[in-house]
Structures are given as C-alpha cells and as structure tokens.
Image: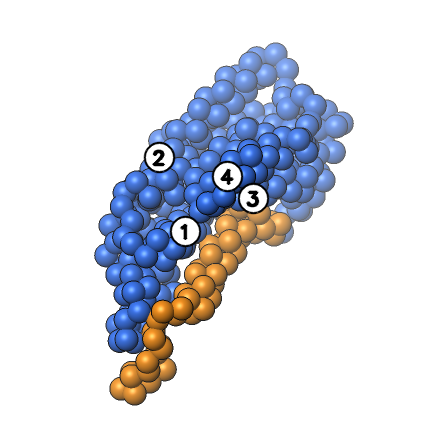
Chain colours: A orange, B blue
Amino acid sequence: MTTTTTLNPTTFGTQALTGTHLARQLAAAALLGLVMLYGVAFADSPLAHNAAHDVRHVTVRPCH
Amino acid sequence: MLLRRLIFCALALALAVGSLQFALQRWQAVPLLLAAEVFEGQKAEAPEAAEHAHADAHAHEHAHEEAHDHDHGAGVWEPANGVERGFWTWVANVMNAMAMALLVLVVASVAVWRRAAPVGWRTLATIAAAGWLSLHFWPSLGLPAELPGMDAPALHQRQGWWLLSAASAAAACALMGFGTRAWRWPAAAALLALPFLVGAPQGGDALAGFSGNAREQMQSLEQQFVWATAWLALAFWASLGAAALPLFRRFLQPLLLAGRSGATQPIAARA
C-alpha cells in the first residue's frame, strides 16, 4: 500500500483512504445494496410483498 | 468519507432513475398487470392451481376478491388501487434503483482502484451491461416474466434459482472484467452455464386455471408483458449507467484517485 496514513490533527477522526478502509467502505455499500434488493424483491413478509408487488412482477423477480 | 458519498450518489441516482422507471412502467407494464388481475379474479381455480396459490405468500387487489380465499386472511395490509398503490410502487422502484446504483458505483470504484486511472463511459457502459446481464437477462432466461394469475413452481425454488443464476452470471462478469489469466474465459463460460445445468424449476401449464377466451387473452397479455419487461429493463440499466457516469466522475473518482496515488492529505476529511 503506497498510501501514507498521515493524520491531520485538525481533522481528528478522519483518515486517508487506504486499501483496507476502501475495501471496508465498498463492502458496506455493496452490502447495503444487497439488503435493499432483498427487501424489495425477495422478503417473505406479506407487507413487503404487497407494497412492492408490481415492481417484483415488472422487474421479473419471482413473485407469489 | 467515501461511504457517505457512495450513499448520497446512489440516493440521487435512485430518485432519478427510479422515478423514470416508475413513469415508464405506468405507461408500458401497469395496464397489462391490471388487465391480468381482472382475469386472475375471474379465474376458476383448478385444484393444483389452488394449492400453489395457497402455499405461497400472495395477496392482490383483486377485481373479484371474493373469488379467492387466500391464506393471508383479511388482516394483511395491501395498498388500495390508485394513488396508494402507485405511491408504494414508486417507493419500491426507488429502493430497487438504489440497490442497483450502489452495486454499480461499487464496481466502478473497484475498477478505478485497480487501474489507478480514471474510467470513462466505456467502463460505466460495460458495468451497466454486466448488471443487466446478471440481474435481469440471465435469471429471466430460466424464469420468464409472469403476470398475476399465472401458476408457477413453489416460490422458494424460483427464488433460489434466481439467486443462483444472478450470482453465477455476476461472478462470470467479474472474472471476465477483472481477471487476467487465460482460464478466465472457460471458467466464465462454465459459470454462465451452471444455472442451466442445474435447471430452472419447471411448472406445468402456467395458464392451467384459464380456459377459452380468458386463456387466449392471458396468452396475449403474457406475450406483451414479456416484451414490456425486456424493454423496461434495458431502459433501466441504460439510464442508470448514463446517469451514474457524471456523478461517479464528479464525486467518487477524485477521492479514489487521490487515495490511490498516495496523497498525504487526509482526503477523507474533504468528503
């Protein structure tokens, strides 16, 4: 990793974008995306199903 | 912070692309859904068909609700036809678009980080095409678009196959896009073939509950619906890719490039 992780004391709590930080943040974003996809398209809850019914059909996700 | 920027960019994309998709659906697909629900309400349930419908979570706004006796009972909320149903469909479209936007932005970020160079419209177009292939086209080859009222194999079997086909196709795309070894091509081909070797769940006659004129009408509606969903998916991924490009270049790419080139400034502070 070539990135130097110099912390600027005036910006306490922030850090340079290293490979590890990047990987964690990208993984968190991808996970959030997958959770939202699950909620819209796959959740078994009848409430979620009824609210997203038309979108499930139109986006060709398995529905009822 | 990169994550915060990713989420805000995805939210902006979701509101734009999800709303556009909502409008296109109302024009192209919703009339077909509503027409099919009228037939669904009139459907004389064959014993097998009844079994399917009762085994799965299923509650529609039926034109003839009394014709059905679904296992949900009367207590489960469902949006009333009209504004309420439209509102929740819009919400679901925005959520769906946000999920896809997050995935597109993450893949574009990985591309920038790996190359340590800016990406252009070709990369974004490739990512959008990979999204369309993995999350729409490949699953719908085995499980074509269905209208309300059509019989289908058990829900969990279909969901399982959908996930298998989407994950296999996504892995194949990742291998082709990011791999460097020669064996990535046969491996990607094997991954693409995998869901079809396993086989999509097969049901009997999807229109078993319909006869005569209703059956013909449903067949015609189904054909129109398959085309409508295909065009809508193309429009969705094309608009998502096109809208993601400027946002990604403006808000995410500089942060990634600065981090990649070893900036000594705490770049995250500028987020």
Which residue in the structure is indicated by mark 4?
A: B182
Callouts 4 and 2 in the same chain: yes
The residue carrying mark 2 is B235
SS of the residue under disc 2: helix
Chain of residue at mark 3: B
Which disc number belongs to residue B167? 3
Q: Nearer the viewer, mark 4 or mark 2?
A: 4
Q: Pointer 1: residues within 10 angstroms few (<14), some, or many (20+)?
A: some
At label 4, the amino acid type is: Ala
Three-letter code for the amino acid on which mark 1 is drawn: Val
Q: Earlier in the sequence, mark 4 or mark 2?
A: 4
Subunit that carries the residue with mark 2: B
Q: Quadrant of residue B23?
A: top left
Q: Residue at x 35, y 65 (%)?
A: B2
The residue positioned 63% from the left and 30% from the top of the image is: B196
Which numbered disc flags the more N-terminal residue, 2 or 3?
3
| Residue type, mark 3 in image | Ala
Badge 4: residue crowd in 10 Å (few <14, some 14–19, many ≥20):
few
* Residue sitting at x 41%, y 51%: B107
Q: Marks 1/2: CA distance?
A: 20 Å
User: Which of B102/B22 is in front?
Assistant: B102
User: Mark 2 is on which residue type?
Assistant: Ala
Q: Residue furthest right?
A: B47
Sequence-first disc among 3 and 4: 3
- Where does the N terminus of chain B fall, quadrant-wise? bottom left
* Residue ID at (69%, 27%): B203
Q: Label 1 belongs to which residue?
A: B107
How many numbered badges does the structure rendering display?
A: 4
Q: Of helix, strand and loop, which one carries label 4?
A: loop
